[in-house]
Amino acid sequence: MTEAYRKAVVIGDGGWGTALALVLFRNGVETCLWSAFPEQAKALREARENTRFLPGVPLPDGIRIEADPFAAAKGAEVAFSVVPTQYLRSVATRFEDALGGDVPVLSATKGIEIETFRTPSEILGEVLGRRPIAVLSGPSHAEEVALGMPASLVAASHDEAFAQRAQLTLNGDSFRVYTHGDPKGAELGGALKNVIAIAAGISDGLELGDNAKAALVTRGIVEMARFGKAHGAQPDTFFGLAGIGDLATTCYSRHSRNRRVGEAIGRGKALETILGEMNMVAEGIWTTRALFGPESEARGISMPIAEQVNAVLFDGKDPKVAVTELMRREPAGEMDGLFSR
């Protein structure tokens, strides 16, 4: 009979990592939250609150907080990796010896590594070696999850037994997890939706209205599914929690960093200024760069919204011009290149 994990380490003390530590602790799991910086770990222990990334939410005394990878991972039966993608490889290297070779990992990071176009679970597999890995994804703003507001996600893995055990460990009164067999699709959905969310924010900043934003979100999920299909994912994954569910939340929520970035750009603020003012990471910026870098993974795939986001972010294109070009594209069928054989 499958049993829940009893002891876990959460690698990464950002808002989402802290929220997951709270979910686990509330479910009776002995939990350690790891911080990359000793001074931050000390501040968290003393304040019992993540004032930088999740202010206003108390951290129970029972959640252990460590900066040393060996101390954090000692005795852990499962690990949750919640590190921004562009820092993940270096952080995973710090846990290469600290995390036992049989300890499975749930990746809760949403993004793509710029230099290699590796997804977070692929990075973890390369650094930590062969072990069960699952992707935890779906509509899950840390601010709401930490307060115990209802949320539903997917645990996607080729290892069905691991996904089921992770599901059992995380499920509670306000947190529900479904299992899924397409980790590639779940992971790409979590990354690509941030690019579309920037476009949604630009729409808000330009005050284009509800019709335009609804069309953008709907066409955005088609782009995401096209890209996923071309990279070995199942198209229908993008029409579930890890795709349209996560996309809707990210495009409409006041908590969405990616939407806020887009809105600021739509109102005329420069990307460099926005980045200088941010305390947290908006993964969509770097996912866009990964998509359209020198070794573009989007080449040959119809992704007009993402292409225009890239031009606005990195080529200085006027957002109004980008909107006009999107509207004046050649006529097409709604699902071209997606479900056709």
Image: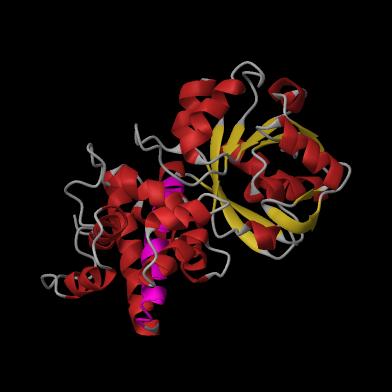
Dominant secondary structure, magenta = helix
Quadrant of the rendered structure where residue 211 is?
A: bottom left
Q: Quadrant of the C terminus?
A: bottom left
Quadrant of the rendered structure where residue 176 is?
A: bottom right
Instruction: State the image coordinates of residue 232 (x, y, percent, origin top left).
Output: 32, 42
What residue span does the magenta drawing correspond to?
185-208
Can you name the residue that lies furthest to the top here? 97
Residue 186 belongs to magenta span = yes
The residue positioned 86% from the left and 48% from the top of the image is 60
User: On the picture, is 211 further left or further right than 14?
Assistant: left
User: On the picture, is 155 further left or further right than 271?
Assistant: right
Instruction: State the image coordinates of residue 315 (x, y, percent, origin top left).
Output: 24, 54
Q: Is residue 49 visible?
A: yes
The residue positioned 56% from the left and 70% from the top of the image is 254
Instruction: State the image coordinates of residue 138 (x, y, percent, origin top left).
Output: 54, 56
Q: How is this picture coloured?
A: secondary structure
Number of disc labels: 0
User: On the picture, is 29 further left or further right than 292?
Assistant: right
Can you name the residue that lies furthest to the left here? 330
Residue 80 belongs to magenta span = no
Q: Is residue 274 above or below residue 251?
A: above
